Every structure is written in structure tokens, then in C-alpha cells.
Amino acid sequence: MAICVIGAGSWGTALAIQFARAGRPTVLWGRAEDEPERLARERVNARYLPGAEFPPALAVEPDLAKAVASTEDVLVVVPSSALRAVLTDLKPRLRPGARVAWATKGFELSTGKLPHQVAREVLGPDVPVAVLSGPTFAREVGIGLPTAIACASPDETFALELARSISTQHLRAYTQPDIIGVEVGGAVKNVIAIATGAADGMGFGANARVFLITRGLAEMVRLGTALGAQRETFMGLTGLGDLVLTCTDNQSRNRRFGLAVAKGKGMDEAIREIGQVVEGYHAARAVREVATRLGVDMPICEHVYRVIYEGLDITRVVETLMGRAVSKE
């Protein structure tokens, strides 16, 4: 079955390339007015994913209605802030029996809802849904370096078919039924990555980095289980795996944002230099609101929020976190 990828940023392009590389007919659609024509002509996304050429099975379609009507499955790869609008736009264009997946990470800021909850509200209960997530950088997937990801869905058949149709000798996909855990991991890890980037930017050392990662994982587990996720999900690819990747490599936009903030750059300046959406910037506020509503203790995420939105000095964060009362791990 053919698949349509909505969103021609770095991650959307990389996933489209991977599906096509695996032999699945793939259609890529991007929102910018001149983008589809340029991608079709150059057969590479020079702006977001240079060096990753399009396989023959990847087509570019400038017309959204045609792109969706020609495929059985649709994969949405947009920031969480745009997910509801994109799904609303897609709904009347979906062909009968179509299935919808996304590679969107983060809570919806205005409602505190996870992507699968937004999808259910927009698409209804009968459309099969799934999420693709895990420890992946777009550039490495695009050029075919070894990678593993998870395809999560309450529909076991959909998850399995997605996993099989994206897998190659360089990418291994696993199925996962816990869509809540996968989505919570994808949201929280971006906030913790800002914290580790800031700590490294301040020169706090490897010990501090590992402290933030491990206690960040504990915060992720607390929030996830409060929302109904399975604890063991966070020990896998979309929990610990994605957290370690995002916190330790400078391909991570969220980590680079933390590094920039530690150097004294303003929030707007840091985002402008990165040049793409920094999901953790918005996730910090959404995670805090959800954690507050549920009464979940998340001190690292709380302090990232205060640095970003209240101007708290980073050195004060260290004093506060290290000065907390002794407790069980």
C-alpha cells in the first residue's frame, strides 16, 4: 500500500525516504508554496536534509488532495502545535478505509492533550491510528545509518504493517501497544534535553549530565504512569533510548537550545539560530501544566519552565535541585 507523508521538514523527509527505500510507494507533501516543485526537481531536500537523495519510489505531490487520495495510509510529521489543524484539514480528504499515523511529539499546548487524543477528537473512533517514535536523528535516517524505532498503536495489525513497511537492513522497527507511554516519552525527553544542554553549557560536567538524564527518566515515568502508561515502556526505545540520544548529541535542537541559553542568549535569539522548531520550548509549558493538574512532582521540568518563561538564573536551578530534601531514589 502507498503512504503519504505530510510535512517536508527534516524528519518528514527522512521518513519518506526510508519508506521509499524499503520499497513502499511514497508520496511527500510540503506546505510551503514553492517547496514541492523544488523537491520534485532537485530530488533532495537541500534545506532540511542535504545529502539524502530521494529513492525512485518517492514521489512529490504539490496538491494535498491528490496526495492523500492516492494513498491508503497517511503519516503526519508536523509540530504538535499544528497537529489538530492538519488533521482537521485531512479528514474530509481521506479515502475510505484510510489509516493515519504521526511522528509528532509533545502535548497540545492549548489543551494538554497527547497526539492520540487530538487525533481521536478530530478523526473519530473508527480510523486506525499509530505513532512512530524513538531514538532517531533525521540526518542519520536520511543517509541510511543503522537505526531502530517503534511503531505504537492499539491496532496491532496497523503497527505491524507500518513496522514491516519501513524496515530495511539499516533500520529495524519494533511494534508497541502503549501509545500513551510512547507519546509521553517523546514529550518529556525534549524538556530534559534542554536541561542537560544548559548544564553542559555551564560546564557542570559528566556527573551532572547523568544525574539529569536518570532523574529526568524518573520524572518521565511518574508522569506517564499517572496518565495510564505502562512503566516498562520507558525502559525501551521511546523512553530511555530517545532520552539518552536527545540529551547527549548536538544534533538535538533541544540540547543546542539549552547550550545557547547557558551562554546567555535570549530565547528568541537561540531559536532563531537553530532555525527550526524547538519542541522542548513549548513542551516545557505543556508538561508543567499537565504535571500540576495531576499532582506529579517533576522538579527538573519545573525548573526548565522557570528558566524559559520566568527568567530564573541557571545557577539558581543547581542550588535548588541539589538542595532538595534527601529522599528515596
Image (cartoon, rainbow, N blue to C red):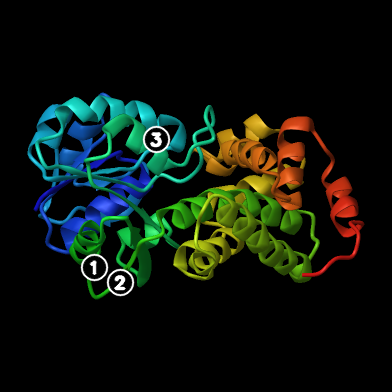
Contact flag, marks 1 and 2 (Cβ < 8 Å)? yes
Q: Is residue 44 above or below residue 328?
A: above
- Label 1, label 3: how far apart the Cα atoms are: 28 Å
- Label 2, label 3: how far apart the Cα atoms are: 28 Å
Three-letter code for the amino acid on which mark 1 is drawn: Ser
Residue positioned 37% across, 69% down in the render: 148
Three-letter code for the amino acid on which mark 3 is drawn: Val
In this view of the protein, can residue 68 be seen by the observer? yes
Circle nearer the N terminus (1, 2): 1
- Comparing marks 1 and 3, which lies closer to the viewer? 3
Residue positioned 58% across, 40% down in the render: 283
Say the numbered circle drawn on residue 28: none
Question: Which residue carries the number 2 mark?
Answer: 172
Circle nearer the N terminus (2, 3): 3
Crowdedness of circle 1 by 10 Å Cα count: few (<14), some, many (20+)?
many
Circle nearer the N terminus (1, 3): 3
In the picture, measured across the screen, residue 215 lies left or right of residue 273, that is right
